[in-house]
Each structure stands twice: as structure tokens, then as C-alpha cells.
Image (cartoon, grey):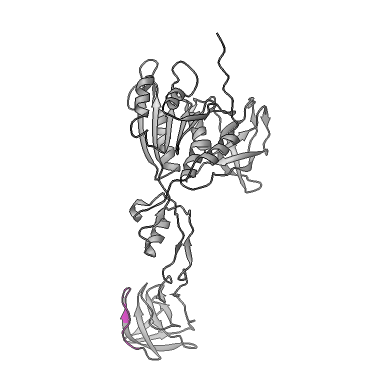
Amino acid sequence: MAESTPIPEIEVADVWRLLDERVLALGPERLPLAQAVGRYLAEEIKNDANQPPFDRSAMDGYAFIPASGPATFHIVGTVKAGEVAVRTLQPGDALRIFTGAALPIPGMAVLMQEEARVEGEWLHVNRRVEPGENVRAQGSDARQGEVLLAAKSFLGPVELALLASVGAVQPLVGPAPRVAHATTGDEIVSPAVTPGPGQIRNSNQVLIRALLEGLMPATNIQQEHWGDDPVGAAARLAAEPFASADVVLISGGASVGDHDYAARILERAGYELPIRKINSRPGRPLIVGFRGKQIAFGLPGNPVSHFVCYHLFVHHALRLLRGLKRTNSQPLALLEPLRDCADRRPTYWPAKLELDAATRLPAVRPLQWNNSGHLAGLVGAQALFCVPANTKELPAGSRVDTLFIYRG
């Protein structure tokens, strides 16, 4: 019987290059602010007016045109936030004023009420007060026409509030990719179920949802579980939400065993599979496929492989769909030696980020994980660093190429 053709191992950099070439950004859309959290701006936002739009009091106190030294002023009225002083002020007049209220005359100052000595209608000022003291000047925060948010800014709570402050209530934002995710395997049971003999709980479904919602917010996620039934799985792949998803994720079944059907059903569904195996660990039996504008990933079943492949490749594809560039890695120092790490493939090692006490620069501390199923070994992971192939040991202080794990 003829041997099957070996599946080539693709370098990580070549996977990234292929994704850069094949993944096309989805179109932007206008959304109300209440639905725009976690999106990226697809336009720059300029200030529609000076902020603040008028000179305003920074605190409760008394407003007047300062004299050259100590003086007494006649209190002729009160102005609260939202009101405008209607009275024409004369030299020597003062107003009782409250935080946020508009100052009627340029060059006024505000004396804090804690400093004020008031007798009836008279305010006694015992020190020199400078013009503009305790005043937020018109345009001091932002001038009309100034760019407040650049295109591709992430829209978190502060950015949304800033949009509201300038009346940008329907911003043009980047898309929310639709992700359909299936975990697979007859041995997998719900996390709420006590596993029977040979069974394990479905941690990968929780892991992928949390990664998508925590690191790529505003993504539309649908999840299912499929048993070891290639015919049934193929039928589900041809149905919604998988048929029209921007990204299809299949957890498990990515290798070449008798029950590993991910590649078979993807090919039958019309996906081209240029990648079936990568030259790195964990996550070597990774599948990457394309069908028109759709992308599919077959993720190796073990959770550490899931974690690493998500950050190296799935996250990359989702950023490209949203019109963003891939997150770049950077060289950081290793805080402690890494021993017995030799493998003939490059290894992407989970790590914590810490400040180097000597340099006060970010550095990495490797986490201890035993194998690609060692989920507890990922606790606290904030980065992945690359251990080159055939490296037996990395001394403390070694510079390692590091990918940060963070939102967006």
C-alpha cells in the first residue's frame, strides 16, 4: 500500500504572511453609541465647538474682574450652571457663582468660597487675584476643528463619552466579525456535568468565548458542540451560523487520526486548505482554510494549543477583518533561566509580564507548563515568547521575541 504524501509544516511567519494576503477587511457601518463599545473608529472625529464652549467657573465661589490688590466688591447677583448672567456688570461688581457656570465677561477670576469674607452684599478680597484664576477658559480642553479621536481608535467608555460630548452619536465604526465555533468529540461533556469514565469537561468552549469577548470585544459569537460524527458535523458546517460566518473555528479533529474529521468536512464544504500543519509548538496540527472571504481554523484539541494558536493566528485574522494590522512582537529580557526547553520546533512559551528591577523595563517570567493539555499552566499568562528550535536552555537576561496578550 502506497504511503500517503507527508503534510508539509508551514513556518509561523509564512502563516502570518498568508493571512495578510488573503484576509480582507470587512466594511464599516454607522452605529448608535450604545452599540459601538468595543468597535474601532473608521473615521476621525473632530471637535464641533470649543471645549469648554465658554469661560466657566472651576468651583463654587465669587466671580469678578480682579483689582491690582486687596479690594471690596459689591455682590449683585448669582449664576448657577446652565444660567447666563443677564445683568450688565460694572467695575467693582461681583457675582456669586457655582461650578460650571458661565462667566459673563472675559478676564474674570473666581475666588473660592473657602477664601471669601462676605458681609451682607459685600465681598472682601484680601490678596491679589490673577485674571483667569479658578476659571476653565473657553477652548482650553480642545479647540473647534481639532481632531479628538483618530481613525482606528478603540471605542471604550471614555472614547464613547467623548463622542457624546461632541454630538457624534452615529459614528462610522469598523465591523464586528461573525465567529461560529464548534467544539468536537464524544468524550466532551458540559462543564456543569460530572464526567463519566473517559469523559472531560468542555473547557475549550469557555476558553474561546472568553478570549473573543475579552480580547476582541464586539465580535458576534455562536457556539455549538459536535460529536464524532463527520456526516452530522458536515451538515452543521453547511447550516447557519457556520455557512455565513466570517470566521469558522473547529476545536479538535485537526490531526490525521481516524476520528479527526475537521480537514475532511472543510474541504467538502469548499474550503481551500493551504495550511494543515505548522512548524511550531504547541499547536502543530493547525488547519487554516479559505472559502471566498471566509476563514476557517481547525484548532488542535488541547487547551494550551488553543490558547497559543488563538493568539498567534485567530486574533491576527480578526484584527485584519476589522481593518487593523497584526500585533507586533518585541524583544524583552527573560527574568529567570529557562531550562530543558529543547525541541526541534520553535516553541511559543506562555509568560507573565513584569518590570525588570535593574532596568525598570518590561520583561518576561516564563510559566511552567508540562504539556499542551496543562490548562493550569496558563494561569497568569500575559505574553508568549518564542524559544528558537533546538534551544536547550535560555539564561536569565536573554532577549526573547515576545507577543503581548491584550485587548483589541
- Residue 240 in percent (x, y) is at 33, 33
Q: Nearer the viewer, residue 25 or 35?
A: 25
Q: Nearer the viewer, residue 187 or 30?
A: 30
- Residue 282 counted in the magenta span: no
Residue that protrudes farthest toward the top in the picture: 1
- Residue 112 in percent (x, y) is at 41, 76
What residue is rendered at 44% in x and 67% in y?
47
Relative placement, left or right, of 147 versus 116 is: right
What residue is rendered at 39% in x and 65% in y?
166
Residue 406 drawn above or below residue 260 = below
Query: Which residues are the magenta region?
Result: 78-88
Residue 28 drawn above or below residue 47 = above
What residue is rendered at 62% in x and 48% in y?
361
Q: Can residue 190 be seen in this view?
A: no
Q: Locate residue 284: give its quadrant.
A: top right
- Residue 338 in percent (x, y) is at 64, 31
- Residue 334 in percent (x, y) is at 64, 38
Residue 253 drawn above or below residue 324 = above
What residue is rendered at 44% in x and 88% in y?
71
- Residue 84 counted in the magenta span: yes
Q: Is the magenta stretch mostly helix, strand or loop?
A: loop
Residue that protrudes farthest toward the bottom in the picture: 91
Relative placement, left or right, of 272 versus 342 is: left
Q: Locate residue 278: give its quadrant.
A: top right
Q: Is residue 95 visible?
A: yes
